[in-house]
Amino acid sequence: MKYRVSHRFLLLPHHTRPFNHTRCFTSFAKKFQTPQARASVNGGSGNSQGDSFLVPGATVATILMLGVLHARRLYDDKKTEEMREKGIELEFQPDVKATFLRILPLRSISRCWGYLTSMEIPVWLRPYVYKAWARAFHSNLEEAALPLDKYTSLRDFFGRALKEGSRPIDAYSQCLVSPVDGIVLRFGELKGAGAMIEQVKGFSYSVFSLLGASPSLPTTADGDVQEEHSESITTTEKNKKSWWRVSLASPKVWDPTSRPKRGLFYCVIYLKPGDYHRIHSPADWNILVRRHFSGRLYPLNERATRTIRNLYIENERVILEGLWQEGFMALAAIGATNIGSIELFIEPELQTNKPMKKFLHSEPPEERVYECEGVGRMLKKGDELGAFNMGSTVVLVFQAPISKLHEGDSSQEFQFCVKGGDRIRVGEALGRWHCS
């Protein structure tokens, strides 16, 4: 008995499936072949129109990441809201999370996330991705300076500028404004020799450890600061490098008997992923020094603040330090997981979250002194200073008046205009005082 061999299919052994089943599978698989794949089999050229319907793998991964972040945010917000309704203030309670996070390569993960968010998204898909992000994290897309299809990647969308006039700046001269959009976590006056900032109820960290070794950071919260720094003031006056340091601190200009004493204050503002991510100047000030600490990249959400010790000190951060009309001021921009990139518009060449051969937590910060290059970096209130990717945290440390010149007159003391848990936007007043 002779078998007829087909020129299209191979002869199947007796133990394989019947011929008609194989034929059905072949026809079924052909339906899912892309135009480019079919063309290559036939030896022809690919169909370029079919490529527009293919979603890159990086875009799929980004969309999945957005879904995971949204689900986690909903869970955290629900638990936090339940605690607030019961009037419970969560206390510091360390758990195994910190130990587990130390094992993870969070810096490498953040660089991978940065690479994904830098991938170009197809033009037709951009509005859908950004609108989905806005719904998940409550972003206001009407404030965006450009149409959605003009932002080539999620990274560009995160750091987007706003339409002119979207963030009016409080023009009152005796007023300190918020440098970012976010939630006010903690604020107050720093008292005592330790100068501790409360991270969460039950745990605090040192402001000196946060900012680093700073010779200009006041060690006492009163008008005697200028006596402690009289020598450095005299040297600065001779060199005439910065009129700010002379005019703000020199005894020849300021008479201690004719002005209020100054205290040291702080304010911690947390930026959610859906917030506007650019950093603005909180006042007219002169930035003299920049420090970059290459630390870890723990998350900065509510749970992390109450479970990880020294969270803001452990993490990578950029410190800007200088002087304003009331004395010392420092701004700490703190990075977090997936937000390893902190950009400075006043120093575009600065790079954060760089690969490190060996991580040493005791490694000294990389420092740049702007004053040696001239007067410093002069900024007006509301000027753009830098930007985060996604959300993060800003800690503001500054001097302000604390004592009254006349009995019964407290108008010249610095008073915060916010409460814990308040949402605040760039340009809105953090605190005010009045001068006679």
Image (spheres, grey):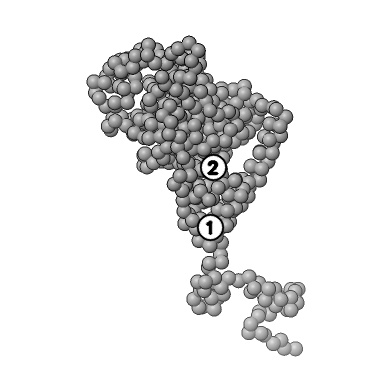
Q: Is residue 343 above or below residue 219?
A: below
Residue at x 51% of width, y 55% of height? 148
| Residue 114, x across and y down, in percent | 50, 47
In this rendering, position of residue 217 left or right of residue 269: left
Residue at x 55% of width, y 53% of height? 130
Numbered disc in front, either 1 or 2: 2
The answer to whether any part of residue 364 appears in the image is no
In this rendering, position of residue 117 left or right of residue 135: left
Among the two numbered marks 1 and 2 on one chain, the one whose residue lies closer to the N terminus: 1
Numbered tag placed on residue 275 in the rendering: 2
Residue at x 29% of width, y 26% of height? 243
Numbered tag placed on residue 67 in the rendering: none
Kindly identify the amino acid type of the residue bearing the numbered disc 2: Asp
Residue 199 occupies quadrant: top right
Residue 239 occupies quadrant: top left
For the N terminus, give its image quadrant. bottom right
Q: Is residue 150 above or below residue 331?
A: below
Q: Nearer the viewer, residue 46 or 299?
A: 299
Residue that carries the numbered disc 1 in the rendered image = 126
Kindly identify the amino acid type of the residue bearing the numbered disc 1: Arg
